[in-house]
């Protein structure tokens, strides 16, 4: 859908895939605009069940990253196109579990930029939520 921004017409595309959990509120999984993909915050929901994955922060982090990968792939992008991740966690003492999850998930590719913020609570009792900014696929 074309949107007018500062006098310039831009394309804004809504990204949706059944390979990632659907929105639990009034938002889209992701929006593509100006050559970037902006995902909404993702929690560790398993797409097939709609339930939060068991196993704590590390397991949730890996599931979140899988969900982000599915959204990016639906948009024609990939993990290597991620520019920045923002991580929200309910207990900063679990920061090392996030690092372990990132190492396990991303393996040998260059890590994206990242911010981590401790928050008081997250939707549906999640321990971690991550949003992403990535380059749009060709």
Image: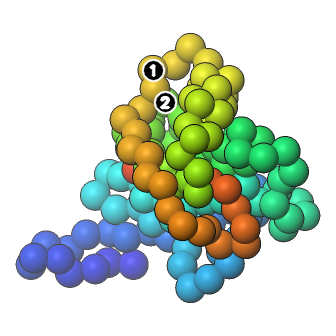
Residue, disc 2: 80
Q: Residue sitting at 17 percent across and 77 percent down?
A: 5
Left or right of residue 119: residue 65: right
Q: Quadrant of residue 59?
A: top right
Left or right of residue 97: residue 76: left
Disc 1 vs disc 2: which is toward the camera? 1
* Mark 1 or mark 2: whose residue is earlier in sequence: 2
Tag 1 near tag 2, CB within 8 Å: yes
- Dot 1 falls on a residue whose secondary structure is loop
Provide residue 41's location: percent of width, then percent of height. Answer: 54, 62
| Image quadrant in which the C terminus is located | top left
Q: Which mark is residue 110?
A: 1
Q: Residue sitting at 49 percent across and 49 percent down?
A: 87
Number of disc labels: 2
- Dot 2 falls on a residue whose secondary structure is helix
Instruction: Please say which color scheme the image uses.
Output: rainbow
Left or right of residue 73: residue 85: left
């Amino acid at each position: 859908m074309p949107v007018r921004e500062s006098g310039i017409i831009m394309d804004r595309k809504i990204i949706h895939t059944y390979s990632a959990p659907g929105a639990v509120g009034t938002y889209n999984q992701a929006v593509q605009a100006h050559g970037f993909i902006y995902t909404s915050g993702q929690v560790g929901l398993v797409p097939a069940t709609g339930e939060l994955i068991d196993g704590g922060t590390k397991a949730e982090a890996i599931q979140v990253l899988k969900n982000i990968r599915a959204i990016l792939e639906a948009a024609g992008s990939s993990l290597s196109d991620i520019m920045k991740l923002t991580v929200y966690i309910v207990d900063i003492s679990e920061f090392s579990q996030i690092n372990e999850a990132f190492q396990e998930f991303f393996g040998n590719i260059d890590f994206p930029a990242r911010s981590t913020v401790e928050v008081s609570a997250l939707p549906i009792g999640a321990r971690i939520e991550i949003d992403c900014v990535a380059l749009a696929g060709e």
